[in-house]
Image (spheres, grey):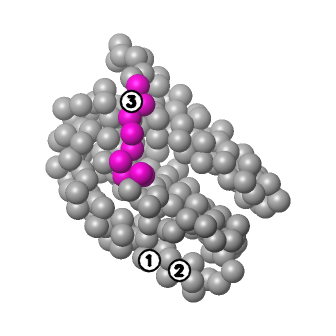
Amino acid sequence: MLGLKLPTDPRWVNIVEKNIEEILTDHAYCEQKAASTAISLIIGFPEKTELVQAMTALVKEEFSHFKMVHDHIVARGWVLGRERKDEYVVQLMKFFPKGGSRTTHLVHKLLYAALIEARSCERFRLLSENISDPELATFYRNLMASEANHYTMFLTFARQYGEDRAVVDQKWQDLLEYEAKLMKDLGTKETMHG
């Protein structure tokens, strides 16, 4: 369903389990960045009323997820650590060339967001099925559906706003192939995407 070309190595969960505090901190910042992406889409494309309404709802949802992650951190007696650089996102964002029309820029932002949400969904599924902490397993199972919905929403908007559905679909497939190559070198750290 997610269309990912290379699944995460299940051994990634073993890395996570040895570094729960780190993964929760990274996850908290991922939720903040997702809210920031939604806000940037509102600011950049205010004339797209349907998009603005969806992104407004998404900001609220992502910040509620941030609070849930933060609550897990606090409940364990920890504090939110400092933000880490998300190497996955940094590398992913190099795929589409800079420039182009406003519409092209919007489609690229939406495709990036769709892929990040798809990978998050896949990682949440792995955690929900394999992590030994039952509380976190349930937490990630509950978040998994949200991420799947976000992925489909962003992809639907990219297809809706793109000038040519076939071109958008080809860009999506090309981005998926590129991401699979990136993933060959990732999955060895206690980060949500890396």
Q: Position of residue 136 (x, y in %)?
A: 34, 34
Q: Which residue is mark 1?
A: 173
Please rate how many residues cluster around mark 3, counting C-alpha atoms within 10 Å: few if below 14, some from 14 to 19, many from 20: many
Check the picture and name the quadrant holding the N terminus.
bottom left
Mark 2 to mark 3: distance in Å?
34 Å
Q: Which residue is mark 3?
A: 25
Badge 3 element? helix
What amino acid does circle 3 point to? Thr
Q: Are marks 1 and 2 in contact (CB under 8 Å)?
A: yes
Describe residue 188's horizontal placement relative to residue 115 as left or right: left
Who's the residue at 63% across and 71% down the image? 100
Q: Quadrant of residue 27?
A: top left
Describe residue 166's horizontal placement relative to residue 10 as left or right: right
Near-viewer residue (119 or 143): 119
Q: Position of residue 51 (x, y in %)?
A: 73, 58
Q: In this picture, is 38 found above or below 27?
A: below
Please rate how many residues cluster around mark 1, counting C-alpha atoms within 10 Å: few if below 14, some from 14 to 19, many from 20: some
Mark 1 to mark 2: distance in Å?
6 Å
Who's the residue at 36% across and 16% down the image? 78
Badge 1 element? helix
Q: Is residue 148 visible?
A: no
Q: Which residue is mark 2?
A: 169
Give the residue at the far front of this rendering.
99
Mark 1 to mark 3: distance in Å?
31 Å
Disc nearer the start of the sequence (2/3) = 3
Q: In this picture, is 115 found above or below 37?
A: below
Describe residue 182's horizontal placement relative to residue 121 as left or right: left
Disc nearer the start of the sequence (1/3) = 3
